[in-house]
Image (spheres, rainbow, N blue to C red):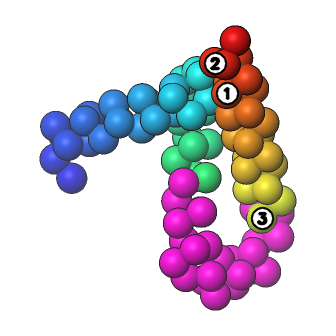
Amino acid sequence: MEKAFAQQFEALLEKYSELLLGETNEDTKEKVKAWALYTHIAKSMPALAKHWNELYPEAKEEMKEIIKEIKELNEQHRKASKK
């Protein structure tokens, strides 16, 4: 991957995280990246996601926590934006 593209993609991810959650830092960006990729995989190749979930149950639980956290932060951000 070219350096310019990597930087531009990182900027896209940062803005997406900010719009989705109302904040952005390295931790939230990594969680959003994992959430987005996992969600895409689960929708486009559900058998692969199921296999991964069975192979790595601890990682599955961590992913569930990431999904829950992102959902909660998004709901808080949307409520704060309406005020």
Main SS, magenta region, reads helix
Q: Is residue 48 left or right of residue 64?
A: left
Q: Residue at x 79, y 46 (%)?
A: 68
Query: Which mark sits nearer the N-terminus, 2 or 3?
Result: 3
Magenta region, residue range: 36-59
Q: Which residue is mark 3?
A: 60
Residue marked by disc 1: 78
Q: Looking at the image, is 27 positioned above or below residue 42?
A: above
Residue 12 relative to residue 78: left or right = left
Marks 2,3: beta carbons within 8 A: no
Rendering coords of residue 10 (x, y %):
35, 36
Give the mark nearer the N terminus: 3 vs 1.
3
Q: Residue furthest front?
A: 82
Q: Amino acid at mark 1?
A: Arg
The image shows residue 39, relative to residue 70, as above or below, that is below
Residue designated by label 2? 81
Query: Residue, x 30% and y 41% (percent of image)?
Result: 9
Residue 46's quadrant in the figure?
A: bottom right
Spatial CA distance of label 1 from label 2 is: 5 Å
Q: Give the image location of residue 77, x and y in percent.
A: 67, 24
The secondary structure type at the circle numbered 2 is helix
In the image, which disc is placed on residue 14?
none
Residue plotted at (67% across, 27% down) = 78
Query: Compared to 7, does 83 lie above or below?
Result: above
Real-space CA distance between mark 3 and mark 1, rounded to the nearest whole angstrom: 27 Å
Quadrant location of the C terminus? Answer: top right
Residue in the picture at 62% in, 29% down: 21
Q: Is residue 50 magenta?
A: yes
Q: Is residue 21 magenta?
A: no
